[in-house]
Image (spheres, rainbow, N blue to C red):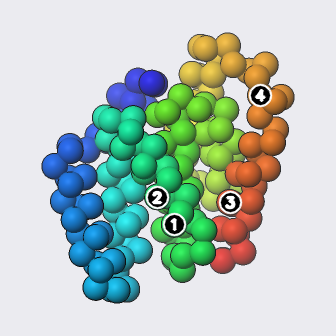
Amino acid sequence: MADSSKAQLPLTEPELVVDLQNEYEKLSREGSSDADQACFRLAWALVHSRSLKDVQRGLDLSTLLLQGHDLGSDTQRDAVYLCAVAKYKLGRYIDSRHQLEELLKVTPDCRQAQHLKQVVDDQIVKEGLIGVGIGAGVLAGVAAVVVGALMARR
Protein backbone atom coordinates (compact mmCIF):
# COMPACT_ATOMS: atom_id res chain seq x y z
CA MET A 1 0.00 0.00 0.00
CA ALA A 2 1.15 3.51 -0.76
CA ASP A 3 1.94 5.87 2.04
CA SER A 4 -1.28 7.86 2.11
CA SER A 5 0.25 10.46 4.42
CA LYS A 6 2.63 11.36 1.58
CA ALA A 7 -0.40 12.05 -0.59
CA GLN A 8 -1.91 13.99 2.32
CA LEU A 9 -5.14 12.03 2.06
CA PRO A 10 -7.58 12.16 4.95
CA LEU A 11 -8.10 9.00 6.97
CA THR A 12 -11.44 7.94 8.40
CA GLU A 13 -12.06 6.08 11.60
CA PRO A 14 -13.98 2.78 11.61
CA GLU A 15 -16.76 4.35 13.69
CA LEU A 16 -17.48 6.88 10.94
CA VAL A 17 -17.71 4.09 8.37
CA VAL A 18 -20.22 2.25 10.58
CA ASP A 19 -22.30 5.40 11.11
CA LEU A 20 -22.39 6.18 7.38
CA GLN A 21 -23.20 2.56 6.53
CA ASN A 22 -26.17 2.71 8.92
CA GLU A 23 -27.31 6.03 7.44
CA TYR A 24 -27.09 4.67 3.89
CA GLU A 25 -28.97 1.47 4.75
CA LYS A 26 -31.73 3.43 6.51
CA LEU A 27 -32.21 5.86 3.62
CA SER A 28 -32.13 3.03 1.10
CA ARG A 29 -34.80 1.06 3.00
CA GLU A 30 -36.97 4.18 3.12
CA GLY A 31 -36.50 4.78 -0.61
CA SER A 32 -35.25 8.28 0.17
CA SER A 33 -33.99 10.50 -2.60
CA ASP A 34 -31.01 11.20 -0.34
CA ALA A 35 -29.77 7.59 -0.61
CA ASP A 36 -27.36 8.38 -3.47
CA GLN A 37 -25.72 11.17 -1.45
CA ALA A 38 -25.51 8.87 1.58
CA CYS A 39 -23.92 6.24 -0.67
CA PHE A 40 -21.39 8.83 -1.85
CA ARG A 41 -20.54 9.80 1.74
CA LEU A 42 -20.09 6.13 2.61
CA ALA A 43 -17.89 5.58 -0.46
CA TRP A 44 -15.76 8.59 0.56
CA ALA A 45 -15.30 7.23 4.08
CA LEU A 46 -14.47 3.75 2.81
CA VAL A 47 -11.93 5.01 0.27
CA HIS A 48 -10.20 7.00 3.02
CA SER A 49 -10.15 4.10 5.48
CA ARG A 50 -6.96 2.46 6.70
CA SER A 51 -8.43 -0.95 5.79
CA LEU A 52 -7.73 -2.15 2.25
CA LYS A 53 -10.95 -4.16 2.40
CA ASP A 54 -12.86 -0.92 3.06
CA VAL A 55 -10.94 0.86 0.29
CA GLN A 56 -11.99 -1.87 -2.18
CA ARG A 57 -15.61 -1.54 -1.03
CA GLY A 58 -15.34 2.23 -1.52
CA LEU A 59 -14.02 1.70 -5.05
CA ASP A 60 -16.90 -0.67 -5.78
CA LEU A 61 -19.46 1.82 -4.45
CA SER A 62 -17.91 4.74 -6.35
CA THR A 63 -17.97 2.72 -9.55
CA LEU A 64 -21.58 1.76 -8.91
CA LEU A 65 -22.52 5.40 -8.36
CA LEU A 66 -21.04 6.30 -11.74
CA GLN A 67 -23.16 3.68 -13.47
CA GLY A 68 -26.68 4.89 -14.01
CA HIS A 69 -27.18 7.10 -10.98
CA ASP A 70 -28.45 10.63 -11.45
CA LEU A 71 -25.67 12.57 -9.76
CA GLY A 72 -24.81 16.20 -10.15
CA SER A 73 -21.69 16.96 -12.19
CA ASP A 74 -19.68 17.86 -9.06
CA THR A 75 -20.61 14.58 -7.36
CA GLN A 76 -19.77 12.65 -10.53
CA ARG A 77 -16.37 14.34 -10.73
CA ASP A 78 -15.79 13.55 -7.07
CA ALA A 79 -16.81 9.91 -7.59
CA VAL A 80 -14.27 9.59 -10.43
CA TYR A 81 -11.65 11.13 -8.12
CA LEU A 82 -12.60 8.67 -5.37
CA CYS A 83 -12.02 5.81 -7.81
CA ALA A 84 -8.54 7.19 -8.53
CA VAL A 85 -7.79 7.57 -4.81
CA ALA A 86 -8.91 4.00 -4.13
CA LYS A 87 -6.81 2.62 -6.97
CA TYR A 88 -3.81 4.55 -5.65
CA LYS A 89 -4.30 3.22 -2.13
CA LEU A 90 -4.70 -0.31 -3.50
CA GLY A 91 -1.37 0.02 -5.31
CA ARG A 92 -2.96 0.12 -8.76
CA TYR A 93 -0.88 3.14 -9.75
CA ILE A 94 -1.19 2.84 -13.54
CA ASP A 95 -5.00 2.56 -13.25
CA SER A 96 -5.09 5.54 -10.91
CA ARG A 97 -2.89 7.60 -13.22
CA HIS A 98 -5.08 6.91 -16.25
CA GLN A 99 -8.21 7.80 -14.31
CA LEU A 100 -6.63 11.04 -13.11
CA GLU A 101 -5.47 11.93 -16.64
CA GLU A 102 -9.00 11.47 -17.95
CA LEU A 103 -10.45 13.50 -15.07
CA LEU A 104 -7.96 16.31 -15.69
CA LYS A 105 -8.99 16.43 -19.36
CA VAL A 106 -12.49 17.34 -18.20
CA THR A 107 -11.57 19.46 -15.18
CA PRO A 108 -7.96 20.62 -15.63
CA ASP A 109 -8.16 22.96 -12.63
CA CYS A 110 -8.93 20.19 -10.11
CA ARG A 111 -6.07 20.70 -7.66
CA GLN A 112 -6.71 17.49 -5.76
CA ALA A 113 -6.43 15.47 -8.97
CA GLN A 114 -3.30 17.40 -10.02
CA HIS A 115 -1.65 16.71 -6.67
CA LEU A 116 -2.63 13.05 -6.57
CA LYS A 117 -1.41 12.56 -10.16
CA GLN A 118 2.01 13.91 -9.13
CA VAL A 119 2.10 11.58 -6.13
CA VAL A 120 1.06 8.64 -8.34
CA ASP A 121 3.69 9.56 -10.94
CA ASP A 122 6.34 9.68 -8.21
CA GLN A 123 5.21 6.28 -6.96
CA ILE A 124 5.31 4.79 -10.47
CA VAL A 125 8.85 6.04 -10.99
CA LYS A 126 9.84 4.84 -7.52
CA GLU A 127 8.56 1.35 -8.22
CA GLY A 128 9.78 1.26 -11.81
CA LEU A 129 6.37 0.60 -13.30
CA ILE A 130 6.62 2.93 -16.29
CA GLY A 131 7.30 0.05 -18.69
CA VAL A 132 4.11 -1.64 -17.53
CA GLY A 133 2.14 1.34 -18.84
CA ILE A 134 2.01 -0.13 -22.34
CA GLY A 135 -0.04 -3.07 -21.11
CA ALA A 136 -2.30 -0.72 -19.22
CA GLY A 137 -3.62 0.87 -22.42
CA VAL A 138 -6.77 -1.20 -22.15
CA LEU A 139 -7.41 0.26 -18.72
CA ALA A 140 -7.19 3.75 -20.19
CA GLY A 141 -10.16 2.81 -22.37
CA VAL A 142 -12.17 1.92 -19.27
CA ALA A 143 -11.28 5.25 -17.67
CA ALA A 144 -12.26 7.04 -20.88
CA VAL A 145 -15.70 5.42 -20.75
CA VAL A 146 -16.21 6.58 -17.16
CA VAL A 147 -15.12 10.12 -17.94
CA GLY A 148 -17.17 10.02 -21.16
CA ALA A 149 -20.22 9.33 -19.03
CA LEU A 150 -19.24 12.29 -16.85
CA MET A 151 -18.92 14.56 -19.88
CA ALA A 152 -22.22 13.36 -21.36
CA ARG A 153 -24.08 14.49 -18.25
CA ARG A 154 -22.75 18.05 -18.51
Mark 4 secondary-structure assignment: helix
The residue under label 1 is which amino acid type? Answer: Leu
Q: Position of residue 31 (x, y in %)?
A: 34, 86
152 shown above or below 21: below
Which is nearer the N-term, disc 4 or disc 2? 2
Within the image, what quadrant is residue 120 found in? top right
Mark 2 secondary-structure assignment: helix
Residue under label 4, please give it.
Answer: 133
Q: CA distance from mark 4 to mark 2?
A: 26 Å
Residue at screen point 37% across, 54% down: 44
- Residue 111 visible in the picture: no
Residue 146: assigned label: 3
Residue contact between numbered discs 3 and 1, judged by CB atoms under 8 Å: no
Crowd band around label 1 with a 10 angstrom C-alpha radius: few (<14), some (14–19), many (20+): many
**Quarter of the image with the N terminus in it:** top left
Q: CA distance from mark 3 to mark 1?
A: 11 Å
Residue 65: assigned label: 1
Q: CA distance from mark 2 to mark 1?
A: 6 Å
The answer to whether residue 144 is left or right of residue 10 is: right
The residue under label 3 is which amino acid type? Answer: Val
Q: CA distance from mark 4 to mark 3?
A: 19 Å
Q: Position of residue 18 (x, y in %)?
A: 21, 54
The residue under label 2 is which amino acid type? Answer: Leu
Crowd band around label 2 with a 10 angstrom C-alpha radius: few (<14), some (14–19), many (20+): many
- Residue 153 visible in the picture: yes
The residue under label 4 is which amino acid type? Answer: Gly
Q: Position of residue 91 (x, y in %)?
A: 53, 28
Residue at screen point 61% across, 14% down: 127
Residue 61: assigned label: 2
Q: CA distance from mark 1 to mark 4?
A: 27 Å
